[in-house]
Image (cartoon, rainbow, N blue to C red):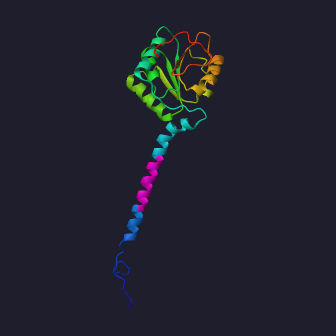
Amino acid sequence: MPKVPEEGGCPKDDFHLKPTTGTKRRTWGLVVTGVVGGSLIEVYAVAMPFVTPALRRVCLPFVPANSTQIENILKMLRTRSGSVVDIGSGDGRIVIAAAKEGFQAVGYELNPWLVLYSRYHAWREGVHHNASFYVSDLWKVSFSQYMNVVIFGVPQMMLPLERKLQTELQDNARVITCRFPFPHWIPNHTTGE
């Protein structure tokens, strides 16, 4: 027997749609997949700038300078004037220390996360007006405008960097190498080990 429409004009049914267990599982599966996928993308975005330097032809890992190394660099800069550049500035410790000493200091770094951290740290230390940080490859930057250059290099890069700086720097510029010396340049002063 056909149902008679009620006052609203639509027939009244006696059943309600209830979600089944399979639908709940599917929803939870999508949520878990989204959370895991999003987490993996975040880990990739944060980790890759730290991993990719190791995959280059010349491995340039991030190794932070310790307080003794920073103090030795500042000793070498105390009688100097002009701007300071840190090639491969990492977390910005050297640039910030030089800026605190009154230098206009610049850092070039490939890792964008370290550059963001350096900028924040310079702002927190109150030297952001004297300290600048750029995401850049050292081979694509001209260092001709800098009077003081600081580099924590690795042995494989020191010869090509020596050639690059030889052609770009002014005669009265000072280059401070930490950990590894240039192969052909004879240092005129050594501080620390």
Q: Residue furthest bottom?
A: 1
Residue 36 painted magenta:
yes
On the image, the x and y values in percent for residue 94 come to: 46, 21
Which image quarter: residue 65? top left
- Asked if residue 61 is among those painted magenta in the image, a careful observer would answer no
- Residue 27: x and y in percent read 41, 63
Q: Is residue 17 left or right of residue 138?
A: left
Q: Which residues, given as a range, are shown in magenta?
A: 29-41
Q: Nearer the viewer, residue 57 or 20?
A: 57
The total of numbered circles placed on residues is 0
Judge whether 192 appears above or below 24 on screen: above
Q: What residue is rendered at 64% in x and 17% in y?
A: 166
| Residue at 66 percent of width and 17 percent of height | 167
- Using the image, determine if residue 97 lies above or below residue 15: above
Q: Position of residue 128 (x, y in %)?
A: 44, 23
User: Which residue, as the protein is rendered here, is positioned at the far front?
Assistant: 193
Task: Say which of 182 and 43 sits in front.
Answer: 182
* Residue at 65 percent of width and 20 percent of height: 163
Residue at 46% of width from left, 19% of height from top?
A: 130
Which residue is at the front of the view, 32 or 55?
55
In the image, residue 22 sits, relative to residue 154, either above or below, namely below
Q: Within the image, what quadrant is residue 125 found in? A: top left
Could you tell me residue 180's position as x and y percent? 54, 21
Which quadrant, please, contains the N terminus?
bottom left
Give the main secondary structure of the magenta stretch.
helix
Point out the residue furthest to the top here: 79
